[in-house]
Image: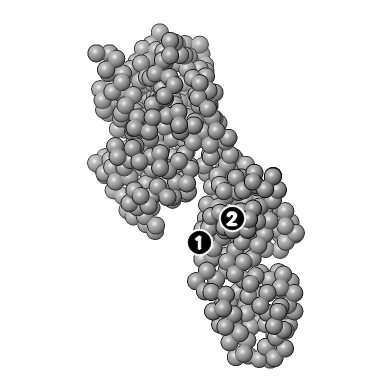
Amino acid sequence: MKKVDVIVIGGGPSGLMAAIAAAEQGADVALLDKGDKLGRKLGISGGGRCNVTNNKDIDELVTYIPGGGRFLYSAFSLFSNRDIIAFFENLGIALKEEDNGRMFPVSDKAKTVVDALIGKARSLGVRLLVHHPVREIRYEEGRVAGVVLASGEFMAARAVVIATGGRSVPHTGSTGDGYPWAQAAGHTITELYPTEVPIVSREPFIQSRELQGLSLRDVKLSVMGPKGKPVVSHRGDMLFTHFGLSGPIALRCSGFIRSVKQKNGGGDVTLAIDLFPDESGAGLEQRLRQLAADEPKKALKNVLKGTIPERLLPLLFTRAELAADTTYEHLPKEPWQAFVSVLKSFTLRVSGTRSFEEAFVTGGGVHLKEVDPRTMGSKLMGGLYFCGEVLDIHGYTGGYNITAAFATGYTAGHHAGLEAREDEG
């Protein structure tokens, strides 16, 4: 039987950071991963460049983590986004800031970040054990005793950190292994669902693929609640696909579709696209009317094709019941007003989202009320800690999820190491 102070299960960003933080407290640490390679999900993050964190102020950063962001204040007080930046720079990894506060390694290679974390862990004496799948965590008399490997071997430990991730991007090893172990300790797992994931629609114009591949730039997308008011809105770029919507703002809105769908009794959810978010309806109407007036004999479809995406125009005209070949001289009042209204709120019904296989992030997880935010320790089982995506925490893409992973990982590892060393004393 092997015996260590701290076992970390999972070799992703939160697990590697937890192992490092525990070892910094002088603990004997073993990191166990079922795969053949550490940091696989980290290696493909940020398009393979690894967006290591976001440089926004903490209060603003938390607003970009709609699932459990406020829970992270204590973790950020110990290890914030600025501490993450300093951590990597102290390892010799130069970082650069890009749009919206996103921080990347100057090398533009995720491997730089993965290698730095693995190297730091090794330098602290962490035992990095790949091909070591865990079968169960053993609990005795209200606290952790150790883990049983798939081989049947028992490894004793004073503390165990579950850093197994969620269920998104399962080909990297995130297959939800940690949830049953948490449940065995008495923890509640909130409903799991894919977030930061493309959206599915059965609208005829989606099914016919007439807009497939069309990108909309700098528009506003809103998820409408049952009472017809926006639940959330995001501004930026989006893409029509053969199954629905994708692109940055569609992904950001995706996590809210589930809750609205539940309130709708399982029915479809309405999304609304504002094609001109900087203009009021009246201002837009006046501007477009002037364009038509400047070329009074020209068909509207030709007047507007330089202002509105040409592939979208036929659908907009149909929605407003306005003939595409209408000229300014014969502009009907009500259809024209309806056309402008559609430009400010082009609605479509969506039925849900794509699966975990296509999601960047998992919503749901270990219930936060059962975890101490100051330590990431279980309130139900001594010596058990959680970090990363196994928790009911999820943010938008842009460095927010990895910031949560590093912060919770460091916090969990730090306190697991302290507890193990205190127990030893």
- State the image coordinates of residue 355 (x, y, percent, origin top left): 62, 42
Along the line of sight, which residue is nearer the eye, 91 or 392? 392
- Looking at the image, residue 356 lies above or below residue 139: below
Q: Which residue is mark 1?
A: 235
Is 28 situated above or below 172?
A: above
Q: Position of residue 390 (x, y in %)?
A: 48, 32
Q: Element under label 2?
A: strand
Q: Position of residue 108 (x, y in %)?
A: 38, 50
Tell me if 98 is positioned left or right of 192 in this view: left
Q: Looking at the rendering, in which quadrant would you find the N terminus?
A: top left
Q: CA distance from mark 2 to mark 1?
A: 12 Å
Of the residues shown, which amino acid type is indicated by label 1?
Arg
Q: Residue at x 55, y 44 (%)?
A: 195
Q: Position of residue 157 (x, y in %)?
A: 37, 15
Name, please, the residue furthest toward the front.
227
N-terminal-most mark, 2 or 1? 2
Mark 2 or 1, closer to the camera: 2
Taking the spot 74% from the left edge, 71% from the top edge, the residue there is 318
Q: Can you say whether 117 is above or below 308 in the image?
A: above
Residue receiving disc 2 = 223
Visible in this render: residue 271?
no
- Display coloring: one colour
Q: Secondary structure at mark 1?
A: strand
Residue depicted at 48% across the width and 43% down the height: 67
Quadrant assignment, res 163? top left
